[in-house]
Image (spheres, grey):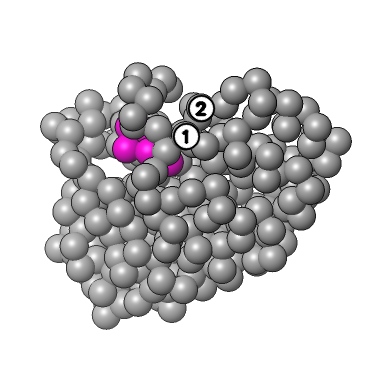
Amino acid sequence: SASFATIVDAPAARFLSGIFLWGALDGLPAEIATRGAPSTLSELGLFAAEPHERHAIMNILRHVGAAPDLPPGPVAVPGVLGPLHVAYARLRRLQLLALYAGGIDFGEVDLPSVCTVEIHTDFTSKNLASIGRAVWPKLSCLELRFGSNVARSGLDVVDDEEDLGCAACTPDDLALILEGKGLVELEELGLVGLSFADAVAAQLQGAPLLKRLRALDLSKGRMTDAGARHLLAARRELS
């Protein structure tokens, strides 16, 4: 919160297009709600942990098209972000949102201008439901990264299968997202690091959202030949 206050109170804040903060972010959503955000702000990245050998969070930032300099630092257990809903009214011009935390409380999402969202966390049934009900009519790219290893390090290889997926959610929790009622402009969907990738591949067959997608990423998860067969059966529905 102190870093955010320093940034938005600076005379140059009126020119800012992006803010990326990492470390302990307790109370930051309330700070944004109280102080507001620069009217020019279009990109926001919140990372509730210290950088992991520099490349960890850089990997996330590059994926969403941003690469600010990060100081080297030891890995820390990801903290919690939220409740975020108190800040949404101040972020209605936001176009890119990147979140990285051990747990995230989204509340009822209302970000009408957001086009790109990337979230790394240990998902739960509750926050997946929030994403499924979200109001973001311009969202074209959504990437969700599941599992403690994938979320924390952003590594290309998951070494321990116990780090895959999230114990607090199931394939059924993705039903609202795959229905796609609030995702009318979505073209790219990433569901990365799923321990239940086979079940999601089966759900994709006939899913309304699939017909609108140009790109689907189910990488770094646990998929067998059965899941691959489901994807092959659904391939003609991909636009």
Which image quarter holds the C terminus?
A: top right
Q: Position of residue 18 (x, y in %)?
A: 40, 54
Question: Which range is magenta?
Answer: 146-150
Tell me the residue at 80%/32% (across/down): 233
Quickly name the residue at label 2. 222
Tell me the residue at 72%/61% (across/down): 184
Disc 2 crowd, CA 10 A, few/some/many (<14, 14-19, 20+) = some
* Between 203 and 31, the one nearer to me in the picture: 203
Give, as a three-letter code, the residue at label 1: Ser
Give, as a three-letter code, the residue at label 2: Arg
Name the mark on residue 221: none
Secondary structure under tag 1 reads: loop
**Does residue 67 show up?**
no
Q: Is residue 34 left or right of residue 3?
A: right
* Between 213 and 63, the one nearer to me in the picture: 213
Residue 225 lies, with reference to residue 165, above or below; the image says above
Disc 1 crowd, CA 10 A, few/some/many (<14, 14-19, 20+) = many
Q: Position of residue 48 (x, y in %)?
A: 25, 50
Q: Is residue 148 magenta?
A: yes
Quickly name the residue at label 1. 195
